[in-house]
Image: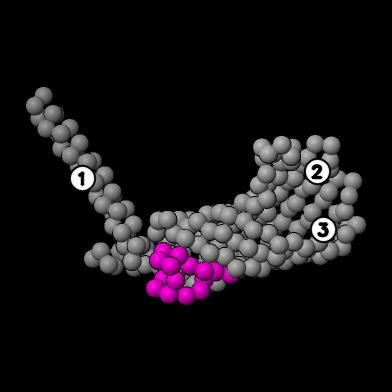
Amino acid sequence: MQHLCLINNTNFKTKQMKNYTILMIIATIATGLNATAQIQKGNILIGGNLANVNLGLNGSKIISAEITPKIAWFIQDNIALGGYIDLGIETAKNSGTTTSYGIGALGRYYAGKEKEVIKHSRFFAEATVGLGGVNVSDADNTNGLNISAGPGFAYFITPNIGLEVLLKYNALVGLGSAPYQGNLNASFGFQIYLPGKSTARRVQNDMQ
């Protein structure tokens, strides 16, 4: 009986050591990422932006929102390529409903170095090209080529999470009762910067 207790106690301590080792590795990687750029080659960007938010709380009885999930890979330091999906809706009492959609490719370029701008922040430019549409019930509709471009600013609240504001001009050219639609759009969002394999290997080498 005593021998069995010793075995169980040994197994428990072994599991504790394994869990402790895993936690130490995670903590070390997180610390290592503080010293590496979030926007370096091999890293991954996942997040989204939110725009045109109106929940009808000011008595206007208009409800609208537009959300744009994104994912991109840094093919070079400061340069990321990926894709996006855009979904939006606007509805009002005694009025038509506007729905918008889009899907396509995006590119980002982050300018400057951390020492050249506000600490823990980056200016960037984003451009997208894809297919999209804006459809208004009983009104003008446009569906076709969707192009947008504009500047943005990202502030990193942690080494891996950035809050951002983005100002872009959106142009939609195609078929429908209105062959062209354009607008200037400001959006807010967040992005998560995940380390790629190259970053993980670099941190692992630093640990040795």
What residue sits right under mark 2 in the picture? 97
Query: Disc 2 marks which amino acid?
Result: Thr
> In the rendering, at what x and y percent does residue 60 appear?
74, 39
Q: Residue at x 53, y 64 (%)?
A: 153
User: Magenta part of the protein: which range?
Assistant: 110-125
Q: Residue at x 35, y 62 (%)?
A: 33
Which of these two is toward me, 199 or 3? 199
Q: Secondary structure at mark 3?
A: strand
Q: Secondary structure at mark 2?
A: loop
* First reached walking from the N terminus: tag 1 or tag 2: 1
Quick check: marks 2 and 3 in contact, CB under 8 Å? no
* First reached walking from the N terminus: tag 2 or tag 3: 2
Query: Disc 1 marks which amino acid?
Result: Met
What residue sits right under mark 1 in the picture? 17
> In the rendering, at what x and y percent does residue 117 appear?
44, 71
What residue sits right under mark 3 in the picture? 143
Question: How many C-alpha atoms fall within 10 Å of the one at disc 2: few (<14), some, or many (≥20)?
Answer: some
- Position of 167 with respect to 159 (left or right) is right
